[in-house]
Image (cartoon, helix red, strand yellow):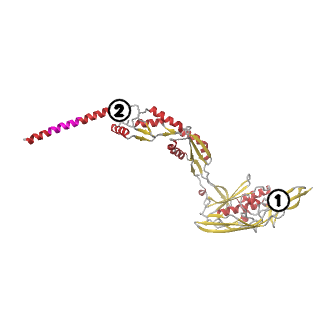
Amino acid sequence: MRIKILRLYILSATKVLFWFTIGAVFGLFLFVSFAFIIFQKLNSNVVYPGVVINGIDLGGKTPSQINEIFAKKNVDIGKTEFVFASETGVATVSASQIGYGYNPELIAKQAMSIGRSKNVFSDANLIITAYLNGIYLQPAYRYSETELLAALNPLVEKLRIDPIDAVFAYKNGKVTTFKQSLDGQVADLEAVKGKLESKFAKVMFPNKQQAIVINIPVKILKPNITTEKVNNLGIKELIGEGLSFFQHSIPSRVYNVTLAATRLNGVLVAPNKVFSFNKALGDISAFTGYKQAYIIQNGKTVLGDGGGVCQVSTTLFRAILNAGLSIIERHAHAYRVAYYEQNSPPGFDATIYSPSVDLKFKNDTGKYILIQTSIDLDTQKLTFSLFGTSDGRKVVLSEPVVANLTPPLPDTYQDDSSLPKGTIKQVDFAAEGAKVTFTRQVTKNGNTILSDKFVSNFQPWRAVYLRGTKE
C-alpha cells in the first residue's frame, strides 16, 4: 500500500517538473526572442558590436560614419606613387590619380551585412560570435582601370611590336626575297593589374609617402607565318653574324663594298658543300662594275679594281667564326688595316685575291645556309648574317695575343701629277708590325668538334702621302 502511494507521488512530481521545465524553456525562449528583437531594433542602423576591419572596430557605427573613416584614410593613401617601369621608359602615377585605396561604400555594406541575412539562427550565431569573440573582415579595395590604362597608354604603345610574317622566295639557287619572321610583343596588362592589386596590403598602412616600382611584363605575339614554314631548306634562325665598319673610306671604296656585299646577298650554301668567296663573287674588275680604290698588291698599296672587297671577305670571315663553321681557307692581310680595327681587335680579318687567295668554309650543319648582307651607309657599317638551323654548337673565341711588335716604317711621299701642285693627300696609314694569334673552340653536346688557331703575321707599314705636281 505504501509502495503504491509512493509511486503515485513520484509520478505526480515528475509531471509537475516536466510542465515546469517546458514553461521555463518557453519563457526563456520568449525572453531571448524579445531581447534579440530589442537588440536588433537598437542596432538597426549601425554595425553590430564586434565587427572589425583592418583593426578598426566598426560596431555601433553607421554606414556614413564608416564611409568617412575610410575616405580619410584614402587621403593619405592617395599620396603613394606607383612607378611603372618598362624597357621603353617609366610612368609615375599617384594613387589618387587612379582612385587607388579602400572602397568605403563596399566596406560599409560588408560590415552592415553581418547578422542581417534572412536566416534567423545564422544571424543570431554571427551576432553572438561577434559580440563575444569579434568577427574580423578583410577590407575591400578599388582603383579605376580606366584611369590606370589612360596613364599607361604611352608606355603600352611604345612597348607594342607587331609580329612580322616570314617571306621567302628563291630562283636558280639564289634567294631573291627573304624576310625572317619576328615575334611581336604587347604589354601584359592583366599581369600589371595583378601586381597592382598585390600591393594593397603594403599601401594601406603608409607611415610615410612611398614610391612603389611595378615592372610591366610583356606577352609574346607569334607571327602567323614563321620562317620555318615558308621553306623546306631548314632556314629558320640566325646561326652567326659578323660586322665591320668602313668609316673614312673614299667614295669608290664605299661603292665597291656595297656592290660586292649586294652580290653575295641571298647566296645559298647546300649541306656538306664548300663555299668559295671568289667563286661566289665572280670576276672583280671594271668589266663587272667595280671602281678603282686602294688595294694591297705585291706588298704595296696601289689603286686597283675592286679596292674594298676585302672589307666584305673580312666581315664574312667574322660571321663564319661566330657560327662555328669549319674554315677551309683563310689568309691574313700583309699589314694591319685600320678599317678592320674600328670595331675589332687585330687579327680578325681575311684577304682575298682571285684566283689564288680565297676564303672558304664548309657547311657542316646538315641544313642549307642562307647568306644575308645589310649595309648602313649612314654609319658605314656592313653586316653579314648567316641563317640556317642551329645544331646546338657553341663557340668560344679567345682574346688575341699581340706579340713581336715592331714600329711603323718611315713616312713616304710620292709625286702625283693628277693632283694640283701643293696638295698633300694621305692614301695609306702607318701601322705597327705584329704577330697576332687567337683560337676558337667549337663544342656540341659538350664535345669539341672544332679547335682552330689563327695566326696573322703583319708587316710594319708606312704612311704614304701623294704630293701634287700638276701646274
Q: Quadrant of residue 384?
A: bottom right
Q: Nearer the viewer, residue 109 or 352?
A: 109
User: Which percent across, then down, holds residue 309?
Assistant: 76, 61
Q: Is residue 352 above or below residue 16?
A: below
- Residue 121 higher or lower than 316, as above or below: above
Earlier sequence position, callout 2 versus callout 1: 2
Q: Is residue 406 magenta?
A: no
Q: In which quadrant will I find the N terminus?
A: top left
Which one is in front in this view, the residue at disc 2 or the one at disc 1? 2
Farthest left residue in view: 1
Check disc 2 and report the residue beneath it: 39
Residue 430 figure quarter = bottom right
Q: Mark number for residue 427?
A: 1
Answer with left or right where residue 232 lies relative to residue 128: right
Name the foreground residue: 449 vs 304: 449
Q: Which residues are magenta?
A: 11-23
Magenta highlight: main SS = helix
Looking at the rendered structure, the number of numbered marks drawn on it comes to 2
- Where is residue 179 drawn, in percent x and y? 65, 54
Which residue occupies 52% across, 37% down? 74
Density class for disc 2 (Cα within 10 Å; few <14, some 14-19, many ≥20) is: few
Vertical order, 306 against 224 (above or below):
below
